[in-house]
Amino acid sequence: MTRSGVRLGVDVGSVRVGLAASDPSGLLATPVRTVQRDATGEDADLEEIARAVAEHEALEVLVGLPRTLAGEEGPAAAQARQYARRLAVRIAPVGVRLVDERLTTVDAHRSLRESGVGGRRQRAVVDQAAAVLILQAGLDAERTTGRPPGELVRPDGRKPRTKDRGR
């Protein structure tokens, strides 16, 4: 049984963060906005995501975890984990989960190109499109398995318990 409530999807990039939201029934993901990453250390990007969580009364946030095609985690995955942990601290008690996002940005670029969105316009929305793909994959996984998707991020930085992994 799928839980009801809005979920937010987050695609973490080095320059921008894409946001998507689900409908309250958890069936369909739609783009919300693109947030500029805050390079100043003030965490304005995390604050904007926290505002979106409150605005949408989100049940949880799904952050994309970029793995290699072989399933390995490299530097980008480590950065996504760190970002997700900082977000989890900021929005607790709302949960944050990491979900596999292999190829979502590639798929987002391809979908936008096929729909006639190109060049600069594509850069402005590709992060949102990737966030939609991440969130939709998580929603579909929960509907299929009956369990929350991905891996729970613990604000205290400890490894999740086995039961917290949606694998």
Image (cartoon, grey):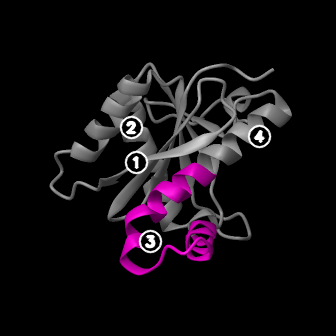
> Of all residues shown, which one is farthest toward the bottom?
119
Nearer to us of marks 4 and 3 is: 3
User: Which amino acid type is marked by label 3?
Assistant: Gln
Dot 3 lies on which element?
A: helix
Name which residue lies at 16% across and 45% down: 42
Q: Nearer the viewer, residue 149 or 20?
A: 20
Residue position for label 4: 141
Determine whether 141 is above or below 39 in the image: above
User: Which amino acid type is marked by label 1?
Assistant: Tyr
Nearer to us of marks 3 and 2 is: 3
Identify the disc placed on residue 83: 1
Q: Are marks 2 and 1 in contact (CB under 8 Å)?
A: yes
10 Å neighbourhood of mark 4: few (<14), some, or many (≥20)? Answer: some
User: Which amino acid type is marked by label 4?
Assistant: Ala
Q: Are marks 4 and 1 in contact (CB under 8 Å)?
A: no
Task: Locate residue 109, reporting x and y percent.
Answer: 55, 72
Q: Is 116 part of what is drawn in magenta?
A: yes
Q: Earlier in the sequence, mark 4 or mark 3?
A: 3
Residue position for label 3: 122
Q: Which residues are magenta?
A: 106-133
Q: Nearer the viewer, residue 157 or 141?
A: 141
User: Which amino acid type is marked by label 2?
Assistant: Leu
Q: Earlier in the sequence, mark 3 or mark 2?
A: 2
10 Å neighbourhood of mark 2: few (<14), some, or many (≥20)? Answer: many
What predominant SS class does the magenta segment belong to? helix
Task: Locate residue 125, reporting x and y percent.
Answer: 43, 62
Residue position for label 2: 87
Task: Locate residue 93, reporting x and y percent.
Answer: 44, 19
